[in-house]
Image (cartoon, helix red, strand yellow):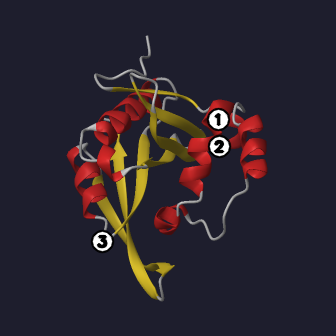
Amino acid sequence: MLNLRGKHIYLRAIEPRDLEFLYELENNTAIWEISGTTSPYSKHVLEQYLDSAHRDIYDVKQLRLCICQFDDKVVGLIDLFDFDPKNHRAGIGIIVLQAADRNKGIGSEAITLLCEYSFSTLQLKQLYANILEDNKSSIHLFEKLGFQSVGLKKDWIYSDGTYKNELLYQKIKS
């Protein structure tokens, strides 16, 4: 049986009650670089998103889950995107919003749970992550969890007047 519960966190579907968290996260300009966001989101637009968030991964090709502590506090989001059931692959992305919640094993546990779900329930063969070359924390996290660097996208992200390289990481189910 699939278990989306770890020792310190659990993953659950995003719900209407998560509007304030989503509003804070999506409008945090410090993470726009990695999310590709270029303008703020209104609560109305986010409410519309939440109204359709229940749609099936096979339909919308993505899945967004809340990362929650056992006191039900939402600390981040983890996503599967570019879901490709024909080729048995998807991208994975994660954000833990508050710096105080980082480097405590939350990201590691969330990625591990999502990998297990992806490989067992969704029958995926591989997951990939796009990581900015200067994001040493994410590089360390994904490498620790068995993702391997398989490519470099030169000058891929334009941010603050400069181009940045993005690394492609991949984990193939053994």
Q: CA distance from mark 2 to mark 1?
A: 5 Å
126 or 138, which lies in front? 138
Circle 2: residue type: Lys
Q: Position of residue 162 (x, y in %)?
A: 44, 87
Horizontal side, residue 60 vs residue 90: left or right: right
Choose top left, top right, bottom left or bottom right for residue 153. bottom left
First reached walking from the N terminus: tag 3 or tag 2: 2
Instruction: In the rendered structure, find residue 61 and report the number of the disc placed on it.
Output: 2
Q: Check if mark 2's residue and mark 1's residue have beta carbons within 8 Å.
A: yes
16 or 83, which lies in front? 16
Q: Residues within 10 Å of mark 2 (few under 14, many from 20)?
A: some
Q: Position of residue 144 (x, y in %)?
A: 21, 46
Circle 1: residue type: Ile
165 or 99, which lies in front? 99
Looking at the image, is mark 3 or mark 2 nearer the viewer?
A: 3
Where's the C terminus, which quadrant? top left
Instruction: In the rendered structure, find residue 57 and report the number of the disc placed on it.
Output: 1
Residue 93: in sight, yes or no?
A: yes
Q: Which residue is mark 3?
A: 134
Residue in view at x 49 percent, y 23 percent: 121
